[in-house]
Image: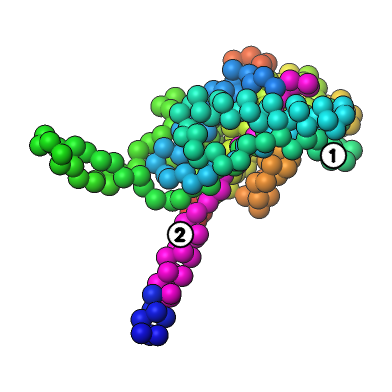
């Protein structure tokens, strides 16, 4: 009897450890304007794209936590952070996420702004006006029930994983890249002569970050480009006065990815100066590209 109980206990431990081993967590961040809890159309579209990646796995739990920057009173920030969390929760349900999976949804109040002399203060503040979504899921395929022609008879059939990303993945890092691929990131824009992002860049940055956090096999090189200079020359970064604008823009993307939790060992960056024109004009020459340097399966 003792031996049987021991075997049963060992089996349960094995099943539990196997379950925990297969369980993973992916995070996604939505940023907000000052004193606002409204979600932009761009953020809604990016979140929908992020959720599409979970169509073939089994989601266990979802948490939605809202935050504010440190400006304002503690009480008002707590209320605003809760409104942000509720707004995102409602959007998740609107996007067909099962409401019962959302185990936590609350406002956490204000976050203290990080101190970094190399990053502009308003950018640092913007990183704290956010809602963080954490999705815990199991790496198993969903089972699909197919009902036969005969009434009250059904069978469970395991389906092959489907491609969940939109067919138009131009300008996006997707889950099916190969070594050597280069992706020009759409809508990652900078202030003229600066390495600071324009606010409309955040949805594209968040989408890139979400993919890098979820698809951990990619090791990438971030390539910065500038316009309006002769080949062999770099643009001047007005913040520093140095002629390395393509480098500092690539590093800005690198710093953002590291800040949200992407392992720095998977990232590198390089400035390409003004050597590679697109032929489409200055707007398209001021760009950031991602090159897949290595793919290491988990």
Residue extending furthest front?
1
How far apart, in angstroms, are the residues tagged by discs 2 and 1? Answer: 36 Å
Sequence-wise first label, 2 or 1: 2
Q: Is residue 35 magenta?
A: yes
For the residue pair 21 and 62, the one nearer the viewer reads as: 62
Label 2 sits on residue: 19
- Residue at 56 percent across and 42 percent down: it is 103
Residue 116 lies, in percent from the top left, at 86, 40
- Is the residue marked by circle 2 packed among few (<14), some (14-19), or many (20+) residues within 10 Å? few
In the image, is residue 23 above or below residue 179? below
Position of the N terminus, as image quadrant, is bottom left
Instruction: Answer left or right for 145 relative to 187.
Output: left
Residue range in magenta is 9-36
Quarter of the rendering containing residue 186: top right
Tell me, yes or no, whether the highlighted magenta stretch contains residue 86: no
Q: Position of residue 71 (x, y in %)?
A: 87, 28
Residue at image point 10% right, 37% down: 150
């Amino acid at each position: 009897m003792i031996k049987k109980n021991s075997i049963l206990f060992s089996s349960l431990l094995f099943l539990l450890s196997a379950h925990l081993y297969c369980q993973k967590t992916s995070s996604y961040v939505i940023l907000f304007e000052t004193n606002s809890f409204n979600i932009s159309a761009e953020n809604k579209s990016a979140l929908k794209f992020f959720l599409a990646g979970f169509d073939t796995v089994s989601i266990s739990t979802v948490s939605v936590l809202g935050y504010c920057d440190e400006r304002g009173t503690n009480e008002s920030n707590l209320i605003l952070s809760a409104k942000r969390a509720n707004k995102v929760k409602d959007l998740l349900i609107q996007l067909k996420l099962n409401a019962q999976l959302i185990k936590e949804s609350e406002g956490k109040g204000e976050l203290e702004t990080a101190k970094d002399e190399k990053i502009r203060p308003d950018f640092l503040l913007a990183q704290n006006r956010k809602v963080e979504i954490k999705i815990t899921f199991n790496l198993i395929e969903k089972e699909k029930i197919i009902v036969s022609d005969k009434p009250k008879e059904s069978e469970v059939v395991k389906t092959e994983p489907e491609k969940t990303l939109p067919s138009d993945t131009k300008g996006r890092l997707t889950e099916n890249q190969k070594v050597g691929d280069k992706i020009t990131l759409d809508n990652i824009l900078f202030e003229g002569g600066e390495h600071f992002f324009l606010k409309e860049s955040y949805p594209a940055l968040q989408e890139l970050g979400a993919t890098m956090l979820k698809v951990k096999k990619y090791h990438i090189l971030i390539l910065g480009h500038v316009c309006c200079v002769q080949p062999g020359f770099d643009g001047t970064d007005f913040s520093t006065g140095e002629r390395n604008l393509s480098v500092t823009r690539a590093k800005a993307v690198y710093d953002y990815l590291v800040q949200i939790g992407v392992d720095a060992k998977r990232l590198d960056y390089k400035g390409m100066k003004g050597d590679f024109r697109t032929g489409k004009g200055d707007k398209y020459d001021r760009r950031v590209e991602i090159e897949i340097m290595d793919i290491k399966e988990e």
